Image (cartoon, grey):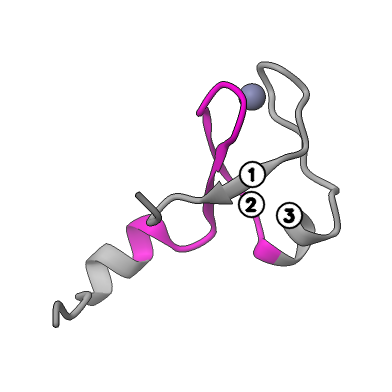
Amino acid sequence: MVKFPESHARKFLNVFVCKKCSTKIRAQSVKITHGKVKCRRCQSKKFRAVRKK
Ligand SMILES: [Zn+2]
């Protein structure tokens, strides 16, 4: 099992990737789940967590 150091968590926490154009956006996860965050490039509201591959 791989442990995530705190620096890694800080880098990836609250960062989401647009599902359409894969632009990274830093936002609070609450805002993401409520659809209050728009992608600045394609205006999409669909994001995924950055850690997922
Ligand atoms: Zn986008």
Disc with the residue nearer the chain's start (1 vs 3)? 3
Q: Are marks 3 and 2 in contact (CB under 8 Å)?
A: yes
- Amino acid residing under circle 2: Ala
Residue 32 is tagged as 3
Secondary structure at numbered mark 3: helix
- Which residues fall within the magenta stretch? 10-29
User: Quarter for ligand 1?
Assistant: top right
- Amino acid residing under circle 3: Ile
Disc with the residue nearer the chain's start (3 vs 2)? 2
Say which residue label 1 marks: 47
Q: Quadrant of residue 2?
A: bottom left
Q: Are marks 2 and 1 in contact (CB under 8 Å)?
A: yes
Instruction: Tell me the residue at 52%/28% (across/down).
Output: 23
Magenta includes 52? no
Disc with the residue nearer the chain's start (2 vs 1)? 2
Say which residue label 2 marks: 27
